[in-house]
Amino acid sequence: MISDQPEGRSAFKTARLRIWRGTGRDNGRYEEFDVAFEEGDSVLDGLVRLRTEKEPSLAVRFSCFNANVCKECTMLVDGNVEYACIAKLRADMIQLDPLPNLPVVRDLVTDTLSRKEQF
Amino acid sequence: MADGHFVEGDVLVVGGGGAGMFAAVAAARNGARVILIDKNVVGRGGATIMAQMTCASALGEAEPDTPQMHLDDTLAAGRGLCNERLASLLCEGSPRLIRELEGWKVNWARSEDGRINQVKAPGHSRKRCVYVDFLSTGAAISAALRNKTSRDPNIRRLSNVSITDLVVRDGGIAGAVGIDLPTSRPVSIQCAAVVLCTGGMTKMFQRTTASNNLAGEGVGLALRAGARIIDIEFLQFYPNGHLAPRMVGLDPTTWEPTRVKLGGRLLNSDGEEFLSRYGEEGGDSYDTARDILTYAIYKEVEAGRGSPHGGVYLSFQHIDGQKLKDALGPVVKVFERNNIDLTRQPVEIFPIAHYQMGGVEVDADMSSSVPGLYAAGELAGGANGANRLSGNALPEAMVFGDRAGQKAAQYATRHYAARWDDRAAQPHVDLIRDVANRNKAGTYPGQLLAEVKALMWRKVGAFRNGRDLAEARERLRSMRHNDMDDLSVASDASFNASLIEWFELRNGLLAAEAVSTAALRREESRGAHQRDDFPETDDRFFANQQLILKDGELVSSFRSVQS
């Protein structure tokens, strides 16, 4: 159970994240984590909290952090292509998968870079 | 771990935000083979893309204006500590680059008569700030520069590469070493000049407007390469930072342009407009400089007149609902998604860590004290003094990036990559391999970073005192010397962000320690540096503070302000 309730915030609820873990679509498994959240928190909030406190090996791509401008945190949220930074957490099971039609680097990270922009 | 990568070029630009992309374009234009690197994705990370609105430029389209007037405002905001030469370059250079960006398809908002719209931002004496609707200024600039840098055959862009060390030989730049995030392989880069455009260090604070990039790495890299840092104690706390209710999908800086544009009212828990208590006539001024606004909000909360989450209220309830909708455009939908109805409720705001005024000390060529090492954008110190004028960050990124790229290219043609030596890079490569193997269970870099962020917020924030600063400095120093060696990283080979985070924290800790050290030494209040134990501005500190790293420790000294 992950919680880091700062002062003055409203009571936390719990979301269950079912996350694809692995280095390919055929090489991996789902893992489930309970994540505490405040009403209004994004899926990205939950993933960042999870990485910081329990699961630093979780791979997820983001830069701007909840401002929805870098557009790096795209993934499948319950099967729909969404930005994790605007999809909301809810007190329920939420399934997260890497984007379809792109090579999976690991976990929720897909290879979105052009060939010439990487080694 | 597999073998490393080796890359060679004339100029390495570290950081793919506005300053970095301008530097890359300028260096390529001046004949250099450029490597442009970002630890996230070039053109998508950093601070530029998050800038919503104001970009100051004395175009004179809305009313008569000159770079000299812009300079006068910049110097006044800087509370005496600006390097006038750098500030002047910024103000004089901005109009040319605004026009140039227009040629690169940045559509500045225009009025019906075809003139570029210019609005008056806080601290400016003229309507001077240009923007792209709707709150998309930084995103539009970033898109144009992404396009520009991707088409230039002399620019090699590398995303997801994090620079961990600069390679210095015989006192000058020989190259750099980093990590390729997708594979965890070490990367060695041979080059004649490095332009650091890594932005500031505000990610080291718990409440921040920073993207994931801004971890103070540039300050750490520069200090460890032997460069001087200047005025690093001055960090801007953005007064109108979003506090509550929870809002995602929009930058927390959104309330300053919105407040100025629509006339939002700042209220305390008694429903009073309180700015008049702090010397601001009428209490509803939109010209109040950021440092004064931050001070006023802190003092209201301290006096027990704060909002439930510990901030103050910003209310738009007095504005007609339709007018509000028209003025906010598509942003209304973002508020709706977050269940925020501005016609029915105020929001809570509180100052939030936003911008690093100081940084790497540079001369008018953007050159640091280390031959071959340049800095630009937020990382370059000097132009903003003790407080940055609203709207000056984007022109700083553009003008200084452009200039640093040009000067670095010229330097590179004179000193063609002569200094590289595998042996000089080897210890840095070895450290990457060593840290990658620290996989026993224990504390992870992200956990220590969380402690740093809480510590910086509590003890090195907008209002400081000697006891807190000394405590913070000691703890940070101990983390740097002791805790870092005991951290673990994940063992994955691919996209192992925890390995990157270890190196990020190594440099960021040095930046955080630099801020606390410099803030402790400056025993006065000036601009964005406010000491409860030294509340007055003191002429003895009418000086710039320099820091260097000597035998592993930070050493501070003061020198008179350069003009």
Image: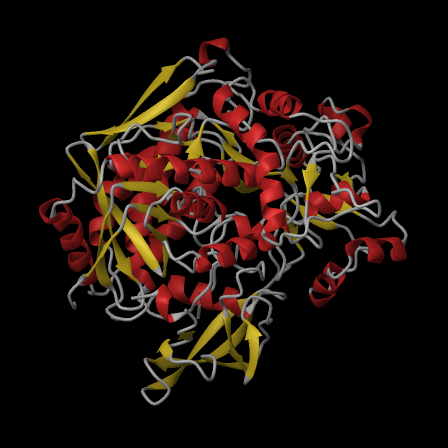
Coordinates of residue B545 in the picture (x, y in percent):
39, 21
- Between B24 and B217, the one lying in front of the other is B24
Residue A55 can be seen in this image: no
Q: Outermost residue, bottom direction?
A: A26
The N terminus of chain B, quarter of image: bottom left
Coordinates of residue B182 in the picture (x, y in percent):
31, 68
Q: Outermost residue, top direction?
A: B539
Residue depicted at 33% across the width and 63% down the height: B497
Coordinates of residue A27 in the picture (x, y in percent):
31, 87
Residue B266 in which image quadrant: top right
Above or below for A14 versus B350 = below
Residue depicted at 30% across the width and 51% down the height: B163
Coordinates of residue B378 in the picture (x, y in percent):
47, 38
Residue depicted at 36% across the width and 47% down the height: B13
Q: Is residue B300 left or right of residue B149?
A: right
- Between B554 and B306, the one lying in front of the other is B554
Above or below for B1 versus B252 = below
Residue B290 in which image quadrant: top right
Q: Outermost residue, left direction?
A: B423
Residue B490 can be seen in this image: yes
- Between B505 and A63, the one lying in front of the other is A63
- Between A75 and B103, the one lying in front of the other is B103
